[in-house]
């Protein structure tokens, strides 16, 4: 594959070790994934680490994903024994809803407490997820104070933090962590959603791959947004968008870099419509 996408900064190895070490401090793991790429945004390394811990999954950015596919994924995870809920973490979050779902997952623990007449409603959660999954925005949304740093660049959260909320929840934040090697499809999808930094990629090539997928999955979105022929080749669609958006350089040649930025930003912000790149 031309892009050869692999990205494993040193701090991510340390994060993996910290997650393993701190699991004993929490009752449940809250795994935040990107609803547009529900498979690729799950770190396979975490499955082994977290296998013995109860888990609640947040399908974040659900407002950017295909609503029909969202429901299919919720059912899929339920069939796997994973409690999953849809969320747009940029909107006000009902913390009690998170708490209630966590209590369902932790039913055995609460039943045992009740038998022993222990009244301890507090739930300690560890937040895990890949870079740019929306973890910090989620934490800021549910915390009493703006305790977590937020950025739109992958890897901005790099230290462990405990955060209190207005419900009986304490959150243990961890930095977003990727894994050393991806297959081609996973690497592309992580790059499309900006979980891997644009700075280390050839975004012109990346955009061609993206347009190829869109032609197959959501050609109507390309027509509605750009008014182009979705049956054309990816490079022809690319150049047609450049022309329509006035992304030209001296001499009338196409500005491929600027056009790539336009297309990827349209996808990432939802201007290209609700899109799920990974379907059941």
Image (cartoon, rainbow, N blue to C red):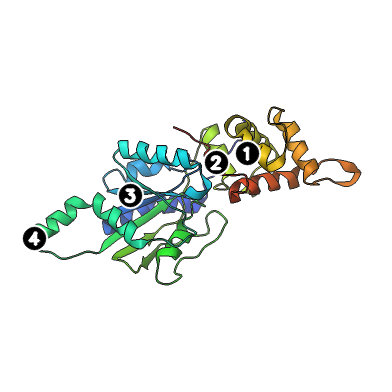
Foreground label between 2 and 1: 1
State how far apart marks 1 and 4 are (Cα).
57 Å
Q: Quadrant of the N terminus?
A: top right
Q: Which of marks 1 and 4 is nearer the N terminus?
A: 4
Q: Total marks drawn? A: 4
Can residue 125 be spotted in the picture?
no
**Residue found at x 29% / y 43%:** 51
Q: In which quarter of the image is the C terminus?
A: top left
Q: Mark 3: which secondary structure?
A: strand
Q: Earlier in the sequence, mark 2 or mark 1?
A: 1
Residue closest to the eye, 198 or 116: 116
Residue closest to the eye, 196 or 146: 146
The residue at which mark 3 appears reads as 56
Q: Which of marks 2 and 3 is nearer the N terminus?
A: 3
Foreground label between 4 and 2: 2
Q: Mark 4: which secondary structure?
A: loop
**Residue found at x 74% / y 44%:** 259
- Asked if marks 2 and 1 touch (Cβ < 8 Å), the reply is yes
Residue closest to the eye, 79 or 183: 79
The residue at which mark 4 appears reads as 116
The residue at which mark 2 appears reads as 275
State how far apart marks 1 and 3 are (Cα).
32 Å
Foreground label between 1 and 3: 1
């Amino acid at each position: 594959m031309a892009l050869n996408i692999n990205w494993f900064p040193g701090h991510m190895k340390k994060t993996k070790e910290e997650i393993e070490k701190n699991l004993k401090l929490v009752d449940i793991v809250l795994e935040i994934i990107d609803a547009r790429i529900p498979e690729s945004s799950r770190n396979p390394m975490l499955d082994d680490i977290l296998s013995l811990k109860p888990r609640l999954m947040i399908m974040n950015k659900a407002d950017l994903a295909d609503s029909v596919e969202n429901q299919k994924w919720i059912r899929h995870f339920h069939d796997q024994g994973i409690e999953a809920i849809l969320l747009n973490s940029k909107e006000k979050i009902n913390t009690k809803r998170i708490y209630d779902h966590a209590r369902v997952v932790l039913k055995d623990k609460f039943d045992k407490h009740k038998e022993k007449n222990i009244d301890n409603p507090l739930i300690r959660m560890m937040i895990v997820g890949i870079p740019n999954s929306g973890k910090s925005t989620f934490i800021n949304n549910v915390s009493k104070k703006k305790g977590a740093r937020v950025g739109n660049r992958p890897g901005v959260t790099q230290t462990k933090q405990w955060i209190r909320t207005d419900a009986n929840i304490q959150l243990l934040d961890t930095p977003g962590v990727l894994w050393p090697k991806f297959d081609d499809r996973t690497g592309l999808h992580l790059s499309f959603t900006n979980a891997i930094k644009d700075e280390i990629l050839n975004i012109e090539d990346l955009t061609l791959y993206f347009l190829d997928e869109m032609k197959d999955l959501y050609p109507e979105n390309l027509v509605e947004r750009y008014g182009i022929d979705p049956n054309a080749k990816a490079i022809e669609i690319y150049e047609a968008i450049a022309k329509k958006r006035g992304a030209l350089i001296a001499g009338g040649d196409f500005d491929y870099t600027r056009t790539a930025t336009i297309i990827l930003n349209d996808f990432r912000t939802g201007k290209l419509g609700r899109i799920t790149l990974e379907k059941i």
